[in-house]
Every structure is written in structure tokens, then in C-alpha cells.
Amino acid sequence: MHAASPELHENLLSSMTGLISRWSSLELQRRITAECGITLDPVAVAALYTLGLSGGTSRPSALADTLHLSRPSTSKLIARMHEAVLLTRTSAPGDGRAVTVTLTPLGQQIFRLLIAAGVSMVADATRTWHPDEVSTLSRLMERFLADLDADFAEKRLPNSTSEAL
């Protein structure tokens, strides 16, 4: 295996940061929702993506962790999305205290619209690429994410402050 130079890693980090910044920007998220005819705040859009990509159901705590939200902010988000009929709240099987949130048919429909808009944007951005290049990028991104997750799991910090002391 050949070690890449620090400059290559810095260029890769810069490209990834640019991608994440652009893709998650409020302006882009508002444009996507407007093109889909949807009026949702960017946090609700992120929640729809998160729920849709994870099979449509999640515990609120997992949703909060993924979205980097506090528990109270997540509760307010879930209440807004429930009121908009985008998700339901139900008691978790076997634990009446635990709750799961699940996309409603409307939430699933909006998720599919958002995914279609994202796929269209990716197709537009790669319209001059050969299909093999798109496939290679996709394969390398999947590999990078898997390696990043594995590396992160190896270096995971203790869960609480007391464990760290």
C-alpha cells in the first residue's frame, strides 16, 4: 500500500468540506424544497432525509444524534413534523416508555420527492462525465465512508465524562 502525501489528503479534505458545505447550505435546501413545491424548514428536511434513508423509523434520541440537535430541539422538531402529518409517534414494542417516530405516507412521498430532486442535481452536475466515472466516484465514496466509520469505531471516545476520568 502506498501512503498518500499530506497535500493529497488536504485537497481531499477541502473537496469534501466544500461538498458538505454546499449540499447542506440553507440556500440549496430552500431551493430544493421550493422546486419540489414543499414548504419545510431545513432542519425538517434533514430529518426527512435521515428518517427516509434509515427505513422510515427511528427513536428520537437517534434522530437527535444524527441531526446534532439537543433533545428539547428534537422534541420540538418532532412535534412540528407530527402536526404537519409527516411522521407519527408510537410507543416502542416491549417498552411503553420508549417512543419511535415513523414517516407517514405523506412524509414518505415528500422524502421521495427530495431524493428525486437530489438525484437530478447529481445527474446535472455529472452530465459531462462518463458513466464509469460516476460509478467509480460512487464506489470510492462508499469505501471512504465505510473506512471512516471503521476508523471512528476504533477510536471512539468513552460515552461519559466519568469514563474518561
Image (cartoon, rainbow, N blue to C red):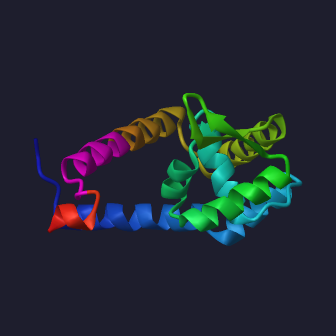
Left or right: residue 31 compared with residue 130:
right
Dominant SS in magenta: helix
Residue at image coords 54%, 67%: 70
Rendered view: 36 above or below 55: below
**Residue farthest to the top, as pictured:** 94
Camera-side residue of 53 and 63 = 63
**Residue farthest to the right, as pictured:** 37
Residue at image coords 85%, 53%: 84
**Residue farthest to the front, as pictured:** 96
Rendered view: 35 above or below 145: below
Q: Is residue 163 visible?
A: yes
Please state, as top left, top right, bottom left or bottom right, where the N terminus lies in the image: top left
Left or right: residue 17 compared with residue 46:
left
Q: Give the range drawn in magenta.
A: 144-158
State the image coordinates of residue 4 (x, y, percent, origin top left): 17, 55
Q: Is residue 127 visible?
A: no
Please state, as top left, top right, bottom left or bottom right, where the C terminus lies in the image: bottom left
Camera-side residue of 89 and 42 = 89
